């Protein structure tokens, strides 16, 4: 059974810092791994999707990497801004079940 | 990306009544739809998977008679919470995927409060 874990659960940084959010998954048989942003009380905003054959994806100040063999993905945020404050969720699409399994999320606070 | 619309965005209902939540794919045919539930400060938990024209597959521990899912067309799935109770209060989110694709697109979510 696929399990997805995110570390840390919460993170507080000053504005301008570069930071890394971690995601690990137990079953390497995945189609893809996706990173989402969720603002309080809101739905999900898809940030980046990495296919199983890819190593990384970039969008603006965001860079996500994927290492299937070790069961890890990271989301790198460069030059963080207060507007980046949100909960970040990673989710792995299981190659066996076709289900998207979510981690618990990392709540990020960027202080001005 | 593709657009998934969920309605209503929030609803308050009395205990014992039923509530229907709609999930529509606006610009693509959603052959598969997923329903998730999220409690405060927790992650999304998959409730069920529905394929167009067939019965939904529920995750372990989810009562299929309480959470009725209908996926009657390629653009619409509904989740009906029957005889709602306060413990059913939660954030419900749907997602949709089209045939042959692995990326799922999410609705905005529905905040259900049962009083």
Image (cartoon, coloured by chain):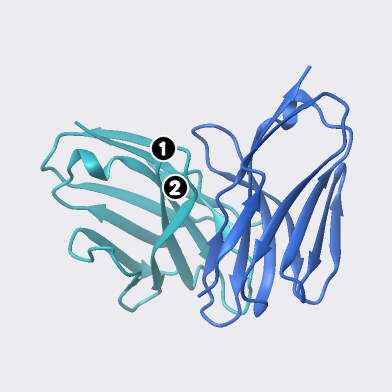
List the single residue furthest toward the top. A112
Label at residue B6: 2
Q: Residues within 10 Å of mark 1 (few under 14, many from 20)?
A: some
Residue on which the image places disc 1: B9
**10 Å neighbourhood of mark 2: few (<14), some, or many (≥20)?**
many
CA–CA distance in space, label 1 to label 2: 7 Å
Label at residue B111: none
Which residue is located at x 61 percent, y 42 percent?
A: A9
Colour cyan belongs to chain: B
Element marked by disc 1: loop
User: Disc 2 on helix, strand or loop?
Assistant: strand
Q: Is residue A11 above or below residue A58?
A: above
| In the image, residue B20 above or below residue A91 | above
Residue farthest to the bottom? A96
The reply to whether dot 1 and dot 2 touch (C-beta < 8 Å) is: yes
Quadrant that contains the N terminus of chain B: bottom right
Q: In the picture, which quadrant includes the C terminus of chain B?
A: top left
For the question of whether residue B27 can be seen, the reply is no
Q: Is residue A50 found left or right of B28 in the rendered image?
A: right
Residue B72 screen position, x and y as percent: 33, 69
Q: Position of residue B10 (x, y in %)?
A: 37, 35
Residue B75, by quadrant, is bottom left
> In the figure, the blue chain has which letter?
A
Q: Chain of mark 1?
A: B
Q: Residue at x 31, y 56 (%)?
A: B79
Asked where in the image residue B89 lies, by quadrant, the reply is: top left
Residue B4 as seen in the image, left or right of residue A24: left
Q: Is residue B65 visible?
A: yes
């Amino acid at each position: 059974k696929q399990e997805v874990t995110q570390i840390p659960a919460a993170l507080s940084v000053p504005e301008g810092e570069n930071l890394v959010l971690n995601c690990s998954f137990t079953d390497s048989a995945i189609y893809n791994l996706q990173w989402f942003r969720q603002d309080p009380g809101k739905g999900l905003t898809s940030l980046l999707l990495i296919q199983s054959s890819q190593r990384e994806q970039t969008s603006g100040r965001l860079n996500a990497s994927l290492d299937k063999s070790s069961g890890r993905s990271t989301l790198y945020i460069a030059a963080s801004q207060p507007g980046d404050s949100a909960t970040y969720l990673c989710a792995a699409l299981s190659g066996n079940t076709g289900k998207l399994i979510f981690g618990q999320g990392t709540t990020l606070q960027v202080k001005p | 990306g593709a657009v998934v619309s969920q309605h209503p965005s929030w609803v308050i209902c009395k205990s014992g009544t039923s509530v229907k939540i709609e999930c529509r794919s606006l610009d693509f045919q959603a052959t598969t739809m997923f329903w998730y539930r999220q409690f405060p400060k927790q992650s999304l938990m998959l409730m069920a998977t529905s394929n167009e024209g067939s019965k939904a597959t529920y995750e372990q521990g989810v009562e299929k008679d309480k959470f009725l899912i209908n996926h009657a067309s390629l653009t619409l799935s509904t989740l009906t919470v029957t005889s709602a109770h306060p413990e059913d209060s939660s954030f419900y989110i749907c997602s949709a995927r089209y045939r042959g694709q692995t990326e799922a697109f999410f609705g905005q979510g529905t905040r259900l409060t049962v009083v």
